[in-house]
Amino acid sequence: MKILIIGSKGFIGSHCVSFYLKKHEVWQCDVVVDYNTPNYLLIDATNANFDEVFRTELFDVCINCSGAASVPDSIKNPQRDFELNTHNVFKQLNAIRKYNIKCKFINLSSAAVYGNPIKLPVEENQALIAISPYGRHKKMAEEICSEFFEQYGVKTCSLRIFSAYGEGLKKQLFWDLFQKYKSNKSIILYGTGNETRDFIYVLDLVRAIEFVINGAKFQGESLNVANGIELSIKNVASIFYKEIDPKINFNFAGQQREGDPINWVADISQLASMGYEQKTDIKKGLSNYIEWLKEKE
């Protein structure tokens, strides 16, 4: 199988490259200049054009790992977020429509499309009530994927990824916990600590994508990608800091951050029906991540 990974230099994209190189012919695509990597396609960061990518090579699968992934930044820079998370998806699919119509397209969406869900666990057919530009733009990208299947027959599937973490991630909750630990100051975290998330380790995530490649319908549908396990921020912060130093104390400010949902846990029935099950629990995943953080230091 010939797989193209767009956003191959990013957090999830780089793990996809490492995973799929063991089994398939992998091509990479990103905005980072790289003269040494074979099968690497460079895209202009300021005006991405994917026509040449799909005109010159035919792919069986395209995994789009590119885009912005920051709720606060989407609030500050909504146009940038729209360009990276919505407009670029349209351009990728339009190039596939013209030059590589048989290519399966997997778009990495986000649980942010749900906002504060009306019930838990969150099912794919629930109402999408995004509460940030990031979530709204991801929702638009999903609609574009459905449009290209319904109108042109392009095989598309969007993955609503919940809270992914692991080696290589340099933002979000666990990265912030480590930065606060290094500062040697009193550790104050956002929220109350009772907020909940559904965490998935990055190597489980790339395995989940493989199940999707082999088992999804590719009819413009959207699928939850998580573990179906609800964990409080207070609980995971405690696991994280106990791994580093059990003497660490931390508190919560009690203030919600704009654009952040309160409670999340996914219904993963569809993903599980394809064969997915969790391999790395939160303790092992955080242990691996902390080891990487320390090596990086």
Image: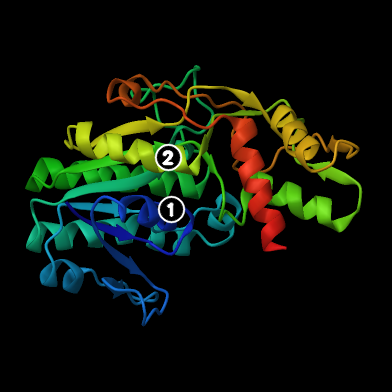
* Dot label at residue 53: none
Residue at the location (44% across, 37% down)?
204
Tell me whether the residue at label 2 lies in contact with that at label 1, contact meaning CB atoms closer than 8 angstroms: yes
**Secondary structure of the residue carrying numbered label 1:** helix
Residue at the location (46% across, 60% down)?
10
Q: Relative to 257, is 26 above or below?
A: below
Q: Which residue is at the far bottom?
A: 35
* Dot label at residue 15: 1
Residue placed most toward the observer, 115 or 17: 17
Type of amino acid at the residue the image marks with label 1: His
Residue at the location (40% across, 49% down)?
137
Q: Say whether residue 170 is left or right of residue 54.
A: right
Q: Relative to 2, is 157 above or below?
A: above
Q: Position of residue 44 (x, y in %)?
A: 34, 77
Q: Position of residue 36 (x, y in %)?
A: 36, 80
Gap in Å between the C-alphas at discs 2 and 1? 9 Å
Q: Position of residue 294 (x, y in %)?
A: 72, 56
Residue at the location (44% across, 52% down)?
12
Q: Within 10 Å of the Cα at label 2, are there few (<14), some (14-19), or many (20+) other Cα atoms?
A: many
Q: Position of residue 184 (x, y in %)?
A: 90, 54
Q: Quadrant of residue 21?
A: bottom left
Q: Quadrant of residue 87?
A: bottom left
Type of amino acid at the residue the image marks with label 2: Leu
According to the picture, the residue beneath numbered tag 2 turns out to be 205
Of the numbered discs 2 and 1, the one sitting upstream in the chain is 1
Q: Say whether residue 264 is left or right of residue 29.
A: right
Q: Within 10 Å of the Cα at label 1, are there few (<14), some (14-19), or many (20+) other Cα atoms?
A: many
Quarter of the figure that contains the C terminus? bottom right
**Secondary structure of the residue carrying numbered label 2:** helix
Residue placed most toward the observer, 143 or 43: 43
Q: Is residue 189 visible?
A: yes
Residue placed most toward the observer, 204 or 197: 204
